[in-house]
Image (spheres, rainbow, N blue to C red):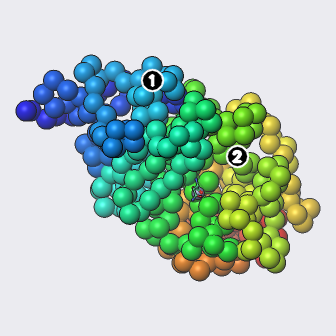
Amino acid sequence: EEVQTATGTGKGVHVGTVTLTTTQSGTTYQLKDASRGNQWTGNAKSGNALYTDADNNWGNGTASDTQSAAVDAQFGTGATWDYYKAKFNRNGIKNNGVGASNRVHYGNAYVNAFWQDSCFCMTYGDGTNNVNPLTAIDVAGHEMSHGVTAATANLTYSGESGGLNEATSDIFGTMVEWYANLPSDVPDYLIGEKINIFGNGQPLRYMDKPSKDGSSKDSWYSGIGSIDVHYSSGVANHFFYLLSEGSGAKVINGVSYNSPTSNGSTITGIGRDKAAAIWYRALTTYFTSSTNYKAARTGTLNAAKDLYGAGSVEYNTVAAAWSAVNVN
Ligand code: ASN
Ligand code: ZN
Ligand code: CA
C-alpha cells in the first residue's frame, strides 16, 4: 500500500473544528501525524488501537461519537508539539523528534488524565457520566509538559519541587492554550475550565489568585512542602501570572482577574511570552530534581539575566513577582 501524509478535518468535544495532519494508507486514513514525530491516537476501549477512518473527516463534536475525544487528543498533542517547537526549537517532549501517543476513553467515568514516561503516552478518561472527556487543550499541554519536566529538570514530585513540577505543567498547559488560540476555547489563566470536573462549570485552578479554588496557596510559607503538589503549585502559578500580567484587577478575553501581592507591592507584567521564556530557560538550565522555591527564585533570575540582562525590567520584575508571593 502507498502510505502518505494527508490533511483531514475534525470536530472535537473541546477544540471545535480543526485541521489534522493524518496518514493515508491505501484507501484508509489513520490518526497519525508524520509531520510531528508520528504522534498518534488510539482507543483504550479497543486495546489502544490506532483510530482509522474512511473519509478523513473525524468526529462530530459530541462525546458520544468515539472519534470526537480522539480529535481533541490528537490536536492537543500537535499544539503542544508546535508550541515547544515554535518558541524554544524543542523537537518533541524529549527533544529527540519522537512523537507521543494518546489513549482516549480510558476506564469508566474516569475523571483524570495522566502522562506516563514508560509508554511515552497520554491517557484520558471520559469524565463524569462519560460525557466530559478530559481532553481540553490546557489539560493536554499540562500532562505532556510533565514529560518535558521529566526529560529536563526532573523535579521530584513531592515537597516544594513537586509544587514547582505541577506549576510547570499549569504554566505550559496555559501557554499551549494561548498558542492554539481556539475560538471554542478562548485562552485564559484558568486550568481545566472546559472539563467541568466539579459539575458546576468552575475551573480546577486559578493562576491570578490560586486560593480561589479553596485549597491552593497564593504565597510561600514554611511548611508549604507538606501539602498536595496541586496546591503548593499555587505559589509559582501566582508568580507566573504576576510576572505576565501584573497585580490588581484586569479583564482579559472577557474573564475577570484580580491578582493580589502578599507584600502590598504593585507589579506591571512583562507579558506571558517573556515570562514563559524565563521559566523554560530556568527549567532546562538551572532547575534540578531538588529545586525548592528559594532556588526557583535564583534560577529564574539567572534565566532572566541570560535572556534580558542583569539590570533589565524583565530581571527586576522576576525579583518583584517572587517577593510578591513571599519567596525572598
Ligand atoms: N492529572 C494529574 C496531574 O497531572 C495526574 C496526577 O495526579 N499526576 O497532576
Ligand atoms: Zn500534573
Ligand atoms: Ca485554560
Q: Position of residue 159 (x, y in %)?
A: 67, 74
| Furthest residue in direction left, as rendered | 1
Q: Is residue 236 visible?
A: no
Name the residue located 86 percent from the left edge and 54 percent from the top edge: 260
Closer to us: 211 or 215: 215
Q: Are marks 2 and 1 in contact (CB under 8 Å)?
A: no
Label 1 amino acid?
Answer: Asp
Disc 2 from disc 1: Cα separation: 26 Å
Dot 1 corresponds to which residue? 65
Q: Position of residue 299 (x, y in %)?
A: 61, 75
Q: Secondary structure at mark 1?
A: loop
Q: In the rendered structure, find residue 204 and report the number of the disc placed on it.
A: 2
- Relative to 18, say whether 296 is above or below: below
Q: Position of residue 99 (x, y in %)?
A: 33, 51
In the rendered structure, the answer to whether residue 33 lies left or right of residue 210 reads left
Name the residue located 54 percent from the left edge and 78 percent from the top edge: 288
